[in-house]
Amino acid sequence: MIPIGTDVRLRRPPVGNWVLVGINVAIFLLVNVLHSSFVETMLPPLHASVPTLYEYISYQFRHGDFWHLAGNMLFLWVFGNAVCDRMGSFNYVVFYLAGGVFAGVVFTATNSNPLVGASGAIAAVTTAFLVLYPRVHVTILILFVIITTIQLPAMFFIVFKIILWDNMIAPSIDSQSMASSVAFSAHLGGYAFGFFVAIATLVFRGLPRNQFDLLALWSRWQRRAGLPSPATFSSAPEARPLSAPAADFGADENVSLSPAQRLQEDILDRLSEHDVEEAARLYGTLLQESSDHILPRSAQLEIGNYLAQSGQHGAAIDAYERFLAAYPTAADAPQVRLYAGLICRRYLHDPVRAAGLLQAACDTLALQSQRDLAAQELRAAEADVSGHGPEASET
C-alpha cells in the first residue's frame, strides 16, 4: 500500500518541501552515485554510541540506497507539501529538522549502531499532517495481483497502517525485522514529536485554527456527546478578557467561522452520520452563500452522487464539474467524467457538454469496458451535435 496523493488543495507553492526533497536527492547522487568523499565526510551518519551535535542534523540527509531514498522522498512529497503549505516554508523546514533531531535523540537512547535517513523527520511531518488534516483522504496505490488505487481516510491510514502496523505490530510478529536495519525507535520518536508539536502550535496559536483540524473534531465530538467543554488555553492573565477569536478552542470555536465555513462543517457532520439528504440540502444553501465553495474530495463526490441518484441532474452536474475543477487528477476523476457525460447526454440533452466530458473520459479511463461505453456515448453525442442523433430524428 503506497500513498501517492491526498485531497489537500494547496494555497501556495510548498517551496520549503521542494528544497528539502531536492537537497536529499542531490546529496544521494553526490555520495552514492558520484562517490564524493568530501560530501560524505561533511555529512556523517549519526553514531549513536558517540554522537556529536552536528550529526543529529547531518544524518537526516544521508540514505543507504536508492529504495531507501525513494520511499522517504515519496512520503515526504505526499504529506510534506500540505504541511509546508499550512506552516509556511521557513517554519516547516525548522519543524522538519527539529523532528529529525528528536528522532535521533530517541534512537541514540536505545541503540549503539550508526543511523542514516530522513525517516524520523518525515515521521514528524506525517503526524503533523494527521493533526492538521484529519478528515482528508489519502490515495493509495495497491500492488497485489492487480494494480489499482483506493482512497482511505488519513486517520485510518496513518494511525493504523503506518504507525501501528508498520512500526509496532509487524516488527513484533517478525522478530528478524527488529534486528534489521530499520530504525523503528527513530520512527516512533518522530511520530510523537510531530503529533504533540502540531497540537501545541494549534493550542497556542502558532498556526491558525480552522474547523477541520484535529482539535476542532475533538470539540465537536464532545458537544455531540454532551460532555463539558474543555478549558480554554491562553497565555493571557486570568483577569484579562479574551476576544471571541482568541477564545475559540473549546465548544465556542465556531464564533470565528464564516457562515460558509459553518455550513461546510455541518455538511461534513451530516455525511459522517450518513444523513446524505440533509447534507445535500445544506450544500445547496452553501452554494447560495458562497458560489465558489468546494468540499473535500470524498464529500463533494458523495453529494454529487446523491444528487444524480435522486434525479437532480442539473445540480449533480454542477457538483461533478466543481469536483473535476478542484481535483482533476483524483483517481476517480475519469469515472466522474464518464458519469457526468452520460447525464448530460441522456437527461440534460446537452450533447456539446457531454462530448467534452466523454472525450476526456475516453482519454483517462483505465478499464476497457468503461472506455468502450465512453466511446459509444461520445459517438452518440457527436451525432446529436451534428443533427443526426436520436434527438434530431424525433423532432
Image (cartoon, grey):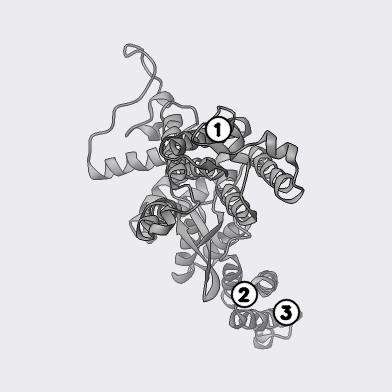
Mark 3 or 2 closer to N-term?
Answer: 2
Q: Quadrant of residue 30?
A: top right
- Pointer 3 with pointer 1, Cβ within 8 A: no
Q: Is residue 295 left or right of residue 225?
A: right
Select label 3 or label 1 by which is in front: 1
- Pointer 1 with pointer 2, Cβ within 8 A: no
Q: Quadrant of residue 84?
A: top right
Q: Position of residue 364 (x, y in %)?
A: 66, 70
Q: Which residue is mark 3?
A: 382
Q: Residue at x 30, y 44 (%)?
A: 221
Q: Which residue is mark 2?
A: 366
Q: Is residue 23 left or right of residue 331?
A: right
Q: Position of residue 140 (x, y in %)?
A: 52, 61
**Residue type (three-letter) at the residue carrying disc 3:** Glu
**In the structure shown, which secondary structural element does the residue marked by tag 2 occupy?**
loop
Mark 1 or 2 closer to N-term?
Answer: 1
